[in-house]
Every structure is written in structure tokens, then in C-alpha cells.
Image: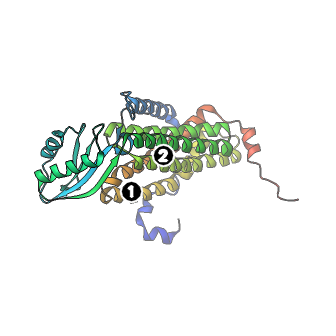
């Protein structure tokens, strides 16, 4: 960072250009906390074992049903809306306000054997009769067959994304480094699922897109750290592995912090002003950046420390290629 750049952004001066933290001193603590959090996230995501989403609050995309977003002239009476739709036997009716007291989101299941279009029109007329003039801003109807296909495709997209990233890591770094990076990647994805299970936020196709983006960010962050570890292993052949990892993390700490804070600022604005449809995506991305940065330092590096590295093999891998004919 040049002097002129730091002059225009004084906050950069708060980040020391050189640090010497002993991260691996508490490697066992990081490993235990990460393992417990990951197991808890898996349990919360799967329990109860009810299809299609278990402990997740599936949106209309995955569960099937109808989603209405409406605006009233006066502050909406949520209990009255819930009672009105409940009287029409629409199954699980969920009503919540978002943005202002006049903005309401309604979700309900379409009764089996009934025409969804007829059900939606009946629900709208009932709401108008109770609330008066209403503006319907969004109407989505998803049948159970389509929702099942969307859920399978969403899970398949996540599985393929994770698999391709792990394949890249394996070829790029070899087995030992690859296991550390793969552990960090699974850690980030599973904790993001756990976030949605704990908070009850809607799990939708937007959430799947957010998790796929988190996968890319997590791998990119981890690759930066592991690449520096490999370089320092070749440079400091007699230095203990824990010291090499500490040195590598400290050398990449400033760059990672600035990258993460920049992303958090943009996503914070998106979460605040992006509306209900983008709120879950924004929160997932914010959480993903935080845990992605954490896992690069305290999951991938810890696994690498526990597995160990054969210095001779690593030096051979990093030997410069002679470009002369």
C-alpha cells in the first residue's frame, strides 16, 4: 500500500503492515471449536428428518405453495390476515411484515386437488375484503412437482460446486494441502446451513446461489494462505511447521482483512436496502465471508499442521521449471 493511498484512506493505517501473531499456539482450541460447531450445524440442519428440508425453513421454491407480497394503505393487522387466510383452509399460513408496517409477505400452501390460480384469486379477494385497497407487488405459485425438482437441482448444484472445487484443490496442491482446503470448504458450507437452521430464515434458490458464491470466496481465500505456506516451506526449510504457518498467515493477514471488509461493506448496504428478497442472500454472504476468512486461517492451516508436510516432496514440487530448450 503506497503512502498516497494510505493518505486518502486513513483507516488503512489501523492495519499494521507487519504482524507477528502466534496463531498456531491455540491450534487445538480452533480445531475443537470448529468441529463442535460443524457437528451442531449438521444436526440442526437435518433435524427433524422430515422432507424436503429437515430443519431448514424451506421457501416456496422448495416446498411448493404461494407467496404474496402486498402493501396496504395503513399499518397491516398481521393477526387479522392470518385468521382470514386460515379460515380458507390454506394449510400452513405464514405472515410477516418487512420494510415498513404497510409491507407484508404472506405464504401459504395450496390445498391438494385445487386449481392454484383459483386459490390465489380467492385469497386476494379475501384480503381486499378485510384490509381494503391492497397493492399486490409479487405473486409466486410453485407446484409440489416443480418444487421437488428445484430442490434436487439445488442440492445437485451445491454438490457439483463442492466436488469441482475439491478436485481443483487436489490437483493444485496435492493430497495434504488439499485435505486442509477441503476441510475449510466443508466447514464454511455446513456452518452456513446451520445459520439458516438456527435463525429460521427462508432457504430458497437465492440461498443456494449465495452458498455457491461462498464456496468460490472460501477457496480463493484458502488458496492465498496455502500458497504462501508452500512458498515459505521452500524458503525456510529448517523452520518448524507451526512457525512457517504463523509466518504465512501474518504475511497474508492485511490483504485478507482489507478484502473481507470491502465485501462486508457492500453486502451490509445490500442487506439494509435490498429488500426482503435479497436479505437472506446478503446475510448468507456476510456470514460466509466471516467464516471463510476464519477457516482459511484456523481450519485449513490447523489441519495442515496436524497432518504435517514432507519438506523434501514440497521442495521438489516447487522447484522452478527450466524454460530453456
Which image quarter holds the C terminus?
bottom right
Q: How many labels sit on residues?
A: 2
| Residue at the spot 48% in from the left edge and 51% down from the top edge | 213
Asked whether 274 or 9 is in front, the reply is 274
169 relative position to 84: left or right:
right
| Callout 2 secondary element | helix
Q: Nearer the viewer, mark 2 or mark 1?
A: 1
Choose top left, top right, bottom left or bottom right for residue 150: top left
Residue 156, x across and y down, in percent: 52, 41
Residue 5 is tagged as none
The residue that mark 1 highlights is 267
| Callout 1 secondary element | helix
Q: Earlier in the sequence, mark 2 or mark 1?
A: 1
| Residue at the spot 14% in from the left edge and 41% down from the top edge | 83
The residue that mark 2 highlights is 292
112 up-or-down from 81: above or below: above
Asked whether 202 or 165 is in front, the reply is 202
| Residue at the spot 35% in from the left edge and 42% down from the top edge | 64
Choose top left, top right, bottom left or bottom right for residue 138: bottom left
Asked whether 47 or 282 is in front, the reply is 47
Residue 293, x across and y down, in percent: 48, 47
115 up-or-down from 278: above or below: above
Residue 181, x across and y down, in percent: 58, 41
Amino acid at each position: 500500500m503506497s503512502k498516497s493511498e494510505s493518505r486518502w484512506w486513513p483507516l488503512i493505517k489501523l492495519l499494521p503492515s507487519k504482524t507477528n501473531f502466534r496463531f498456531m499456539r491455540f491450534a487445538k482450541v480452533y480445531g475443537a471449536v470448529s468441529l463442535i460447531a460443524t457437528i451442531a450445524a449438521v444436526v440442526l440442519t437435518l433435524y427433524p428428518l422430515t422432507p424436503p428440508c429437515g430443519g431448514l425453513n424451506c421457501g416456496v421454491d422448495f416446498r411448493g405453495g404461494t407467496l404474496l407480497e402486498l402493501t396496504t394503505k395503513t399499518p397491516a393487522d398481521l393477526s387479522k390476515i392470518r385468521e382470514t387466510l386460515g379460515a380458507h383452509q390454506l394449510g400452513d399460513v405464514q405472515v410477516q411484515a418487512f420494510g415498513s408496517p404497510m409491507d407484508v409477505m404472506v405464504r401459504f400452501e395450496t390445498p391438494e386437488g385445487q386449481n392454484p390460480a383459483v386459490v390465489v384469486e380467492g385469497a386476494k379477494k379475501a384480503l381486499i375484503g378485510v384490509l381494503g385497497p391492497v397493492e399486490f407487488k409479487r405473486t409466486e405459485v410453485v407446484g409440489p412437482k416443480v418444487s421437488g425438482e428445484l430442490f434436487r437441482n439445488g442440492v445437485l448444484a451445491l454438490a457439483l460446486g463442492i466436488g469441482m472445487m475439491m478436485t481443483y484443490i487436489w490437483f493444485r496442491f496435492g493430497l495434504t494441502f488439499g485435505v486442509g482446503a477441503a476441510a475449510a470448504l466443508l466447514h464454511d458450507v455446513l456452518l452456513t446451513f446451520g445459520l439458516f437452521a438456527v435463525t429460521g430464515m427462508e432457504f430458497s434458490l437465492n440461498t443456494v446461489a449465495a452458498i455457491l458464491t461462498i464456496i468460490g470466496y472460501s477457496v480463493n481465500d484458502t488458496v492465498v494462505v496455502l500458497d504462501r505456506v508452500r512458498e515459505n516451506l521452500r524458503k525456510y526449510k529448517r523452520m518448524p511447521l507451526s512457525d512457517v504457518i504463523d509466518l504465512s498467515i501474518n504475511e497474508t493477514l492485511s490483504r485478507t482483512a482489507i478484502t473481507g471488509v470491502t465485501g462486508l461493506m457492500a453486502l451490509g448496504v445490500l442487506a439494509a436496502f435490498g429488500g426482503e428478497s435479497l436479505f437472506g442472500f446478503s446475510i448468507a454472504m456476510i456470514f460466509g465471508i466471516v467464516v471463510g476468512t476464519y477457516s482459511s486461517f484456523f481450519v485449513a492451516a490447523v489441519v495442515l499442521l496436524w497432518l504435517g508436510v514432507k519438506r523434501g516432496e514440497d521442495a521438489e514440487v516447487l522447484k522452478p521449471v527450466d524454460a530453456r530448450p
